[in-house]
Amino acid sequence: MEILIKRVYEPWSAQDGFRVFVDRLWPRGISKEKGRIDLWFKDIAPSNELRIWFHHEAANWPEFQRRYRLELEAMPETVAAFCALLVSQEKVTLLYGAKDEVRNQAVELRSFLQARECCD
């Protein structure tokens, strides 16, 4: 399975495949229809505490990555359920709302999933 990453505010494309929104909070100004979101899986997103602490500060990125991975490792049932939903898809796009395209939870989530071969 190919896992792509895209900001939810970018236009839908047929190349996106199955679109999964992986933020804890719904994006402002985006309806499910407008965003063409197939699934909102907020349970896989960083905790509210971690999200607030990170505040999308570049200096916090390495520690955010570490803490988010710890959160993911602490919820194996949620990760397994997420992977089970994706395994039948050829292509998945993880959607996020942050402005930073390099340092966001979708980037780290994809890295986490690929390292564990959860969705191969």
Image (cartoon, helix red, strand yellow):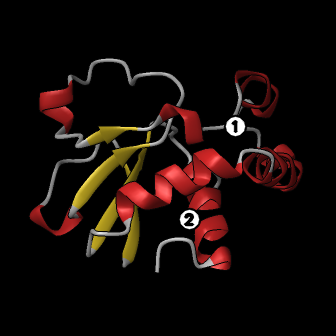
Query: On the picture, is 53 further left or further right than 104?
Result: right
Q: Are marks 1 and 2 in contact (CB under 8 Å)?
A: no
Say which of 90 and 29 sits in front: 90
The x, y position of residue 40, in whole percent, is 37, 35
Q: Which residue is mark 1?
A: 56
- x and y percentages locating residue 114 in the rendered image: 59, 76
Residue drawn at (80%, 46%) of the image: 74
Hey, which quadrant is residue 69 in on the image? Answer: bottom right
108 left or right of 83?
A: right
Q: Tell me where residue 42 appears, x and y as whole percent.
A: 50, 32
Whether residue 101 is visible? no
For label 2, the crowd category at 10 Å Cα-Cα, with few meaning under 14, some 14 to 19 and many 20 or more, is some
Label 1 vs 2, first from the N-terminus: 1
Q: Quadrant of the N terminus?
A: bottom left
Q: Is residue 68 above or below residue 111?
A: above
Q: Residue at x 56, y 34 (%)?
A: 43
Residue 67, placed above or below residue 115: above
Task: Residue under label 2, please give it.
Answer: 110
